[in-house]
Image: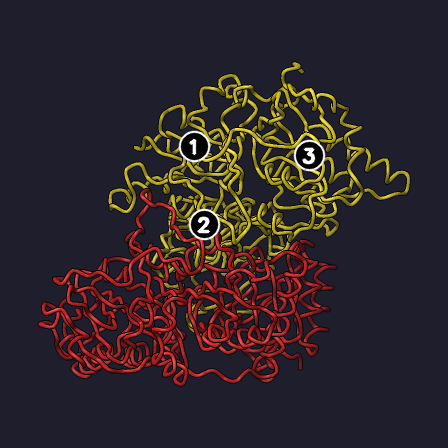
Chain colours: A red, B yellow
Amino acid sequence: MTPDRIASAALRAKVMSAEDAAGLIPVGANVAMSGFTGAGYPKAVPGALARRMTAATAAGETLRVNVWTGASTAPELDGALAEADGIELRLPYQSDPVTRKKINAGTMEYLDTHLSHVAQMVWMGFLGAVDIAVVEVAGIDADGRLVPSSSVGNNKTWIDRADRVILEVNSWQSEGLRGMHDVYYGTALPPDRVPIPITGPADRIGVPHLECPADKVIAVVPTDAPDRNSGFAPPDTVSRRIAGHVLDFLTAEVRRGRLPDRLLPIQSGVGNIANAVLAGLAEGPFAGLSAYTEVIQDGMLDLLDSGTLATASATALSFSPGTVQRFNASAADYRDRIVLRPQEISNHPEVVRRLGVIAMNGMIEADVYGNVNSTHLMGSRIQNGIGGSGDFARNGYLSIFLSPSTAKDGAISAIVPMVSHVDHTEHDVDIVVTEQGLADLRGLSPKQRAEQVIAHCAHPDYRPALRDYHERALASAYGRHTPHLLTEALSWHARFVETGTMRRP
Amino acid sequence: MTPDRIASAALRAKVMSAEDAAGLIPVGANVAMSGFTGAGYPKAVPGALARRMTAATAAGETLRVNVWTGASTAPELDGALAEADGIELRLPYQSDPVTRKKINAGTMEYLDTHLSHVAQMVWMGFLGAVDIAVVEVAGIDADGRLVPSSSVGNNKTWIDRADRVILEVNSWQSEGLRGMHDVYYGTALPPDRVPIPITGPADRIGVPHLECPADKVIAVVPTDAPDRNSGFAPPDTVSRRIAGHVLDFLTAEVRRGRLPDRLLPIQSGVGNIANAVLAGLAEGPFAGLSAYTEVIQDGMLDLLDSGTLATASATALSFSPGTVQRFNASAADYRDRIVLRPQEISNHPEVVRRLGVIAMNGMIEADVYGNVNSTHLMGSRIQNGIGGSGDFARNGYLSIFLSPSTAKDGAISAIVPMVSHVDHTEHDVDIVVTEQGLADLRGLSPKQRAEQVIAHCAHPDYRPALRDYHERALASAYGRHTPHLLTEALSWHARFVETGTMRRP
């Protein structure tokens, strides 16, 4: 830790160990932590808190807290606290295997929330007080201003609303991040809100730092630890085919005059499929594009390097271990092309609608009528969460949902008669894509959508059964607007739970 | 028809009969009509078109068109055209019994769309060309400017995008409407959009007229016919109890400092329950409130008269036959307190989020986990449509859904294990209210929500069965996050379809 990472004398006086800092977190507190994907989360205090929890359990006591973050984090935060059975309630998004297991075992409460909604819900008092904030920063300036880390997430709100703040200063984070952030301090509660003055993805409307009164800070913990994001699988045949369908579609929309040559700002979910679509864009005819998205991952950095992407706005950097080395070494070179914002702004309905974002998100399953499930396996088991997909799909220009047509070696069809949980309603889904093809649902009634989804998206192994269902439903359902056979609608999921496959015996 | 209702000589030259005007509508056209609830829809041309269709059928020909409107209309439009089997596809909302029957018989396609999305979908070219617009106005000025009628709806978009325009000039509409409208001409397609400069419900940002080049107008049809909105049932015990729960809740939120004394702008769906809630507001402690809503109906006019409501913004006036007489006689007196806007603006996500609208909408059913069905009976049969409820529920300050706890003399429970169709996801529903009570779902996990919904909203006759379902699901579901028994989840609906009641034998 070089001393100039903590340039404020007042805050340097509050340096302490992670253990001491974790000792300041009260039992039962609402603990608001930084972190959005495996970026910018506190690296030391959560682990120390988890050890305190384990010790408490051994002593016959219970120490649990509610954990609020930007989005998912990493094993050092979610994994450690969940392993210690220390999370009472988790929000607004997670993707950790241990956390997921506890939620699905019914021993951890989970509130799966639109990522743009969290800050305002906290400001409006809907979730209770922010008892304590634990926020990673890249540095503290002499005047006490904070240089944000590799994600902004809800940090502004956490610091503004918390009574007490613990800062982790992570010297692993690149000095080059300085100036990349745009923290908007113009938000308010209604009736005092005014327009957010963003009219282009790269617009800067705030300041490059976080503000925090020194007297709120109760601990400063120096760390030197890497962000931890997973690597990406190289695009396989299925992902490449999905990407190809998306590229063909966007190209055709430009040709038909429904999209400008430079498209509109793209939003891309996280994961291998999204990364493959970005890789596909690199090979396509496009240049000078922009992104208004949540997360900049490897594929998007490649697009920035090649010039396919001119500028990108997000709330977090989420690079694989190899790419992050490259980025950190030259972060300053990206400062005029990458803007990192609070997630309230990166996902804000007002801005997403105004810019006309092209939303591309993965899904678990879609039904033949165009309803999408992004969160639940077989209707009950949470996978990760809705994340920002609802912010972008409802309010953007186009909502595109992507998935391989099958999972588990074909035992699961991603196209089903009726989804087992709805995160994106029939009113919010424009395009469904699998490696089989693309269904354009715009302007179609439910019955017409079913024909497109079955013909273009379903795997051939499941197509006859879907067609059979739809035809019988058309013939005998209670209504023919969205024809369903109520005793069969969820039978594919029930069969999977019972037999391990959706295939008929 | 006094001559000064059509003051433009150029347009007066285009006056013709409804029959002649209807003869100008091509077979298979996309016909964009005015109308939002039973207000401001064309009164004569649709009927003449229906007669043409019936004659065509008798001659062994087929004359069908696609009908786009603002929202629902009235028997003279939807009823007449549906009766003549003349509608190929209908969007974005309907509530007509004949139309509904055809849709549910599978002989009419219906696209049920967020009301704020329609204008941009048309501008973006997602629905094809506007071949012809049929728009009711209250008058035509000497310079050709149009005085809008009792609804604005999508009329600006229809006129801007249509190649040919048929105007109905309805002298029944009050002269006092002049100046009440605010038509915003600042919209654009991305990437050219700018902030919509509304920061309060009563802000005027546009002009009081519709603009239409005279050479687009192919016919002007004088009419003198009333809008046709249904009357409201006087609030019954159930509605009064629902209203009471809402009032108690809002009062408590003010007390807890989570709402200002004057609340935030209220949005209220149409219908008897919504009207009862408005009547309840009149008896409550509030004054100087505002509304940012779709429709001003009787209850809201009473609130304006009493001063409970200071100002109201909407896209349509939807008064019962009695009230409309009173309003038309003194419409000019309301011009500084009522603003009528295009529905793109009345329901705009940007404005709804900024103002912090309190959204109150009816529903068909909710499930124990807080998902809401606003549109489908037993999963398949369309009732009306989602209307603007999704615009307000997703982006507003609070989303409140209201329903009696049972329907059909208790044969249907409005609280079910799993909704048979989802229009508002678990991520979008804050409050569920029935005459039994109010469930506040904010900050709760699905399991916790179930306890609240069952205890507070379900009818006592159905409460034990819901509790039984939830407990057995908790014990044995595939996951305990949103515990469902897949083979039982829709069994209540299936039982109703089979036996006529959700009650167990």
Q: Residues within 10 Å of mark 1 (few under 14, many from 20)?
A: many
Mark toward the start of the polypeptide (1 vs 2): 1
Residue at image point 38% right, 38% down: B200
Dot 1: chain letter: B
Q: Any mark on residue B312, and which?
A: 1
Residue receiving disc 3: B134
Mark toward the start of the polypeptide (3 vs 2): 3
Q: Position of residue B265 (x, y in %)?
A: 38, 39
CB of mark 3 within 8 Å of CB of mark 2? no
Nearest the camera: B67 or B124? B124
Q: Secondary structure at mark 1?
A: strand
The N terminus of chain A, quarter of image:
bottom left
Q: Is residue B238 above or below residue A400?
A: above
- Whether residue A73 appears in this view of the structure is yes
Dot 2: chain letter: B
Mark toward the start of the polypeptide (3 vs 1): 3
Residue receiving disc 2: B393
Are the numbered discs 3 and 2 placed on the same chain, yes or no?
yes
Nearest the camera: A332 or B361? A332
Q: CA distance from mark 1 to mark 2?
A: 19 Å
Q: Residues within 10 Å of mark 2 (few under 14, many from 20)?
A: many
Amino acid under disc 1: Ala
Pick out the residue farthest to the top.
B2
Dot 3: chain letter: B
Q: Position of residue A452 (x, y in %)?
A: 69, 64
Amino acid under disc 2: Ala
Nearest the camera: A115 or B383? A115
The C terminus of chain A, quarter of image:
bottom right
Q: Is residue A263 above or below residue B294?
A: below
